[in-house]
Amino acid sequence: MRKLHQFHGGLHLEGHKSESLTRNLRQASLPPRLYLPLRQHIGEHNKPLVDVGNRVLKGHVISASSSLIRAAVHAPTSGTVTAISDYPVAHPSGLKDTCIVIDVDGEDEAAAPVIPDLQQLEAGEIIDLICRSGVVGLGGAAFPSSPKLSRGKMQGIETLIINGVECEPYITCDDMLMRHYAAEILRGVGYLQRILNPQFTLIGIEDNKPEAIAAMTSGLAHAGLAATEIVSIPTIYPSGGEKQLIQILTGREVPHGQLAFDIGLFCQNVGTCVAITRALEQDQPLISRVVTITGDNIREPGNWEVRLGSPVRHLVELAGGYLHGDSSPLVMGGPMMGFSLSGDQVPIVKASNCIMVMREQAMTRRPGYHDECIRCGKCTEVCPAQLLPQQLYWHARAGAFERAQEFHLLDCIECGCCSAVCPSGIPLVQYYRAAKSEIRAAHKVQIKSDRARFRFEFRERRLLLKKQQDEERRRLKREALQKKKIQAGGEVPIADPVQAALERVKARKLAEQEDSQ
Amino acid sequence: MTSPHIAPGNSLKRLMTHVIIALIPGTLAYAWHFGPGVLINITLAILFALMFEALALKMRSRAVMPHLTDFSAVVAAWLFALCLPMHSPWWLVLVGIGFTMIAGKHVYGGLGFNPFNPAMVGYVVLLISFPREMTTWYLPGSVSGEALTLADALAYSFGGADIHQWDALSSATPLDQLKTAVGQHMAISEIRLSPVFGNYGGKGWEWVSLGWFVGGLWLLATRTIRWHIPVALLGGVLAMALVFYLADAERYASPLFHLLSGAVIIGAFFIATDPVTAATTERGRIVYGLLIGFLIYVIRVWGGYPDGIAFAVLLANMCVPFIDYYTQPRIYGEK
């Protein structure tokens, strides 16, 4: 048995996993229309590569970007692009964003796959293939996988950590994935090992998923992976957070201001492993994912493999519809870190792991009202980042952002433990998010004004230099002219014109005096 | 709607209710040994506190209802009432609780914003303004041999009875007697012969302290409070008392006497642990508790008052921002 470590704080939460685990993983049908937002991952958003009216095949690239942190988006099925405009998307703000709309033709016609001989490929070429397939981290953050892999390869990795923890209540998509696709996950792990060449590989799974652990263990027996271990870890939220999982498995902390690969560690989610396997073995880009639909207001909670861009409404209908009413409060993600959706027309994106359909009463935290902080310190006890949430709240609320940064606001991982235990019902994380975005905005303004000041000073210097150069040029010209005159007329050069004029006047005066005498 | 999307498992009301429940054993022991006066004080204090709370909220244009029923006023009133002599006139309660609620709490912006423990503010105002009323304590029934009835106590509280008819029952508190006698160069062993002293602390008082202790343990068990402040505070008193007791047992009372007399136990578990005015970091709470423990002993032995909880707590309250700033925990990933 591997020696496990603990992280600070955390919460034992009611799992609510069984609701969505009673049914097997099912394939979702195609909705009539797909909505694919240009912004689906961390980094600069994509630009559309198709026009309205274009017919696309399953797997065609429809949007991409040229920035370093990039992930293309592909057509999840065949159909016609009917619009590229603003639609409601999965974002906490509830604002609309640009989506490519595809009218599905139902034929699901795919472009012919090009399957390379994987044995012949170099690590860099494998990363390129992953990049082309638009793979992003499917654990929730949706960070594009290829730049992360390139960086990891460059840094050198000692331990590869595969995250099958799924610590948030209600969510079971990774659990289902491990039960059904253990072999594909482990082949994906194999590709990661080829790229990163780690000494050890640890697959962390919370001990509330015995079936997944069994499936992965038996899969591992046939996978032929070297130095790879499945580690059952205790169930405590947020053990699936990257930093927390690292702490549990290795006892190490990612130093402040650094990232996991800076200390030779690399984390990847099990879902991402499947996406990598499919991208490499079947030339299938990331066009679908497993989504949990659960909650107390959905008829048949369960897990579905859904094409990206499918509206949540479609998934709700597949799951038998709402138990009460025509609409329901919806949360994308889990109860701790998920966010409310503006409605069920919002499409599933790469980062969507779960849709919670909850009756109003179950979610209510006295909206719009909270008591004042009494500094009880419950938040400090549960904070996995070992922060002082009550002090952060005090400063964030007062708008004292510098002070909040002194108390390490930017180290908050927004896990929501503090908000969950607060006796005053303060939405603490919400205050931190607001403060963080203000700090980021101020930082941007600062960068802009720094740049403006730099430009201004540069221009001043340039003008001054130009003036000096002009003067120098004029001087040289004058001297050259004079030299020319001497050569042409043989005249004695006049050292000083003023002196000469004075002497002329003097001479004239002398002459006048002589005249008068 | 913001995350987390789960029903809240905790509330101010729940915390305050826990504190109230924890106060019951000690309060019952108090009433058992010293008569029903304390119950009258508590009832009056709660009524006046709710009145002032509602008034202040109204004047500050705040919603009266969710705040009035968070029970924070009830807790403050209860703790304040326990500081009073067991038989106090109603107006004394009114004035004290007025200062507790208005000057101690609402002038700073209400619950969560007050830098000083409100109950201690109210108590100290009375102690300084009405020294005679505030130092007229009564003997436990087991010593005086007479028990006051509820009617007697009520009559006294509301001024219908002649105060002097009970002069025989009134007495300084054991701590007060100890202080006066030590001042007269009497030896501790001699002083302790007086009937007001029990086996460990003051007679009757040691049982009350035990009651607070039981309630305090329950608060710890339910994690309503954490161990840092009570342990540090008791440790502070104990350490000081032990050093001086070992140096000169005839001039300095035993550590156990200090722990079980006066308000040390209730102070450790109920007063110093007021989260709003206490330090909030774990190490800070230890510093804060030790500081109070140290100050209690200093005030008791060398100060002008027989007991020092209120002043010790208020002085430590002043240091809280400083303590919190310099005791920040190491965060994840920091060396």
Image (cartoon, coloured by chain):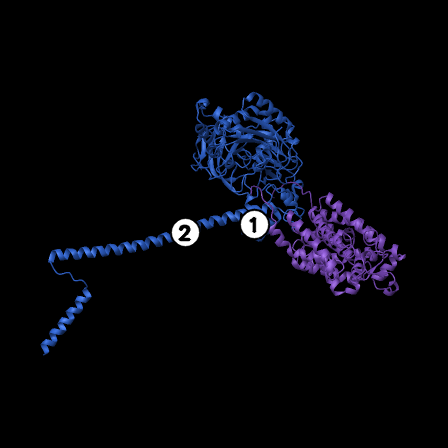
Chain colours: A blue, B purple
Residue wearing tag 1:
A404
Quadrant assignment, res B197 = bottom right
Percent from the top left, x then y, of residue A317?
60, 32
Image vertical order of residue B284 relative to residue A303, above or below? below
Callout 2: residue from which chain? A
Position of residue B292 in the picture relative to residue A355 (left or right): right
10 Å crowding of disc 1: few (<14), some (14-19), many (20+): many
Say left or right for A282 vs B172. left
Image quadrant assignment for residue B128 = bottom right
Image quarter where the C terminus of chain B lies is top right
For disc 1, the chain is: A
Q: Is residue A291 above or below residue B275?
A: above
**How far apart in space, not on screen, are marks 1 and 2 (Cα)?**
28 Å
| Residue A42 appearing in the image | yes
Residue B68 placement (x, y as % from top left): 72, 53
CB atoms of marks 1 and 2 within 8 Å: no
Nearest-to-viewer mark from 1 and 2: 1
Query: Would residue A306 be visible to someone looking at this image?
Result: no
The residue at the far front in this view is: B247
Q: Residue at x 79, y 65 (%)?
A: B132
Q: Along the polypeptide, which appears first: circle 1 or circle 2? A: 1
Badge 1 marks a residue whose secondary structure is helix
Q: Amino acid at mark 1?
A: Ala
* Other-residue count near label 2 (Cα within 10 Å), few / some / many at <14 / 14–19 / ≥20: few
Q: Which residue is mark 2?
A: A452
Residue type pointed to by label 2: Ala
Name the spot of residue B261 as percent of width and height, x first: 78, 54
Residue B288 in picture, x, y percent from top left: 67, 52
Labels 1 and 2 in the same subunit: yes
